[in-house]
Image (tube, grey):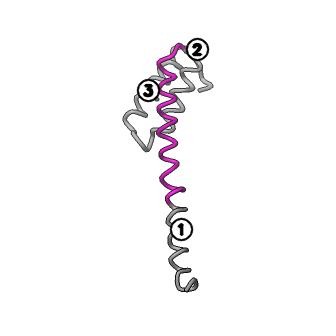
């Protein structure tokens, strides 16, 4: 009886593994975006703000490209105002 159910166990196991590998990272990224956006409401040193904006740009480039571009443009503007070529 167990041998007959073995293929079912394999399919269920693979399904759970795929769920963990593909869905959970997106959820984690969403939480990270929320945390980084919350940081933007705090008073940060300019370099810290630019780093947060760059991180948001990287994360959002595929999830929400327009929002990522907006954050990226703000980071570029801040870097240009400060002649910061490291970022």
- Determine crowd level at label 3: few under 14, some 14-19, many 20+ residues with C-alpha closer than 10 A: some
Q: Give the mark nearer the N terminus: 1 vs 3.
A: 1
Q: Label 1, on which residue?
A: 14
Image quadrant where residue 50 sits: top right
Q: Position of residue 54 (x, y in %)?
A: 53, 30
The residue range painted magenta reads 19-43
Which residue appears at 53% of the width and 80% of the height?
7
- The earlier-in-sequence mark between 2 and 1 is 1
Identify the mark nearer the N-term, 2 or 3. 2
Query: In the image, is residue 26 part of the stretch drawn in magenta?
Result: yes
The kind of secondary structure element at disc 3 is: helix
Task: Looking at the picture, tell me which residue is in the foreground, 43 or 23.
Answer: 23
Mark 2 to mark 3 CA distance (whole Å) = 18 Å
Q: Which quadrant would the N terminus be assigned to in this image? A: bottom right
Examine the rendered structure and indicate whether residue 54 appears above or below residue 3.
above
Q: As displayed, is residue 58 above or below residue 75? A: below
Front-most of 76 and 38?
38
Residue situated furthest left in the rendering: 66
Q: Which mark is residue 42?
A: none
């Amino acid at each position: 009886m167990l041998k007959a159910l073995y293929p079912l166990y394999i399919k269920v196991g693979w399904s759970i593994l795929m769920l963990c590998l593909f869905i959970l990272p997106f959820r984690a990224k969403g939480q990270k975006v929320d945390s980084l956006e919350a940081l933007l409401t705090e008073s940060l040193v300019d370099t810290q703000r630019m780093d947060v904006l760059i991180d948001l740009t990287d994360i959002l480039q595929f999830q929400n490209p327009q929002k990522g571009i907006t954050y990226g443009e703000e980071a570029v503007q801040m870097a240009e105002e400060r002649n910061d070529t490291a970022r």
